[in-house]
Amino acid sequence: MMRRILPFVFLLPLLAHAQGDLLDELNKTKPGTDYTIATFKGTRLVNGHTIETKQAGTLEFIFAHRFGPLDGGVYEMFGLDEAFVRLGLDYGITDNLSVSIGRNSADKIMDSYVKYKALSQRSGQKSFPFTLTALGGVAYSISPRRDDEPEGFETVDRLAYTGQLLLARKFSPRLSLQLMPTFIHKNAVSKTVERNDHVALGVGGRLKLTRSVALTTEYYYRLDPPDNDVLEAQTLSPRYNSLGFGIDIETGGHVFQLVLTNTTSLTERTFITQTQGDFFDGKIHLGFNVTRTFQLKKQERR
């Protein structure tokens, strides 16, 4: 019996030393960095953008549609007789850089933007609490027609610019929140109704209900209140803050978003500064966003 035990007695110090060396190596190993993904499922929250950008080589087709106000009654089939549409293409140059072009039937606007994800939420060794995406856009209004241009009207007067920071945090697998400080400049405006420069703060979020269904909301508060106290603005063109609610449904290669909002416009130039319906006064528009993604470039294996 002793002859069987003695070898183990002599081996114990060696095993203890080896275990100590292994623990030391494990302690020296630094924890990795985990990047947060899918803060939002799509690139649009309701009317505006999320922090998400398209992957490199990915083309996304976006079809956004808004009907007329629900209070139009049976005569307007509760808004279904009216249609306001944006057709857009988003393309990922890199995983963090996207570009887009779109056409809006409302106000006959062509729009384009560049979107760059500068910082990403992550945990671990190099943690960071939120994701930051910068957006720069330009919108060109085809309206009015050339023959209807007022005296002194120039091509540059059709342009408007948007600068936006999108800050979002995914608090849990179900809840994500976003802030959207926004600046908009219009080259030409009706001075009795609005200003050239507009500042707004947007807030929004996403609450995931099931694996494929989520609720979204979005609200833009004008820091420079609309000039609704001006008589012309009251009678001809009242302005309200943009508000929207949505239901996101993920179905394979595309996302379907059913929305309720008080605006028919689909670019920042218009829905932030020119929303003419009061959501709480019944000026609610049913609408939807449909996206379809196409992989144009083979993804590299990591």
Image (tube, grey):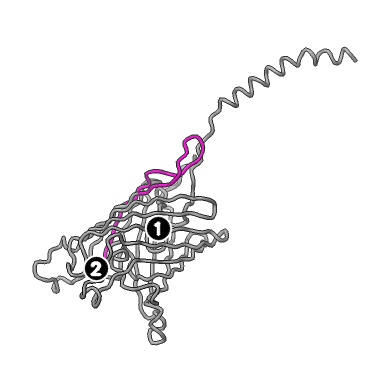
Residue 113 within the magenta-colored segment of the rendering: yes
Q: Which residue is mark 2?
A: 227
How many marks the image carries: the answer is 2
- Return the disc, 1 or 2, that comes first in the chain's sequence: 1
Q: CA distance from mark 1 to mark 2?
A: 22 Å
Residue 250 in the image: x percent, y percent?
A: 51, 61
Q: Amino acid at mark 1?
A: Val
Residue 33 in the image: x percent, y percent?
A: 50, 37
Q: Residues within 10 Å of mark 1 (few under 14, many from 20)?
A: some
Using the image, determine if residue 51 lies above or below residue 268.
Answer: above
Residue toward you, 229 or 236: 229
Which of pointers 1 and 2 indicates the residue nearer the eye?
2
Using the image, determine if residue 59 lies above or below residue 125.
Answer: below
Work out which residue is located at the far left of the displayed protein and give it: 151
**Residue located at (41% from left, 63% from top):** 46
- Label of residue 24 in the image: none
Q: Which residue is mark 1?
A: 203
**Residue located at (57% from left, 58% from top):** 211
Lateral position of residue 258 relative to residue 157, left or right: right
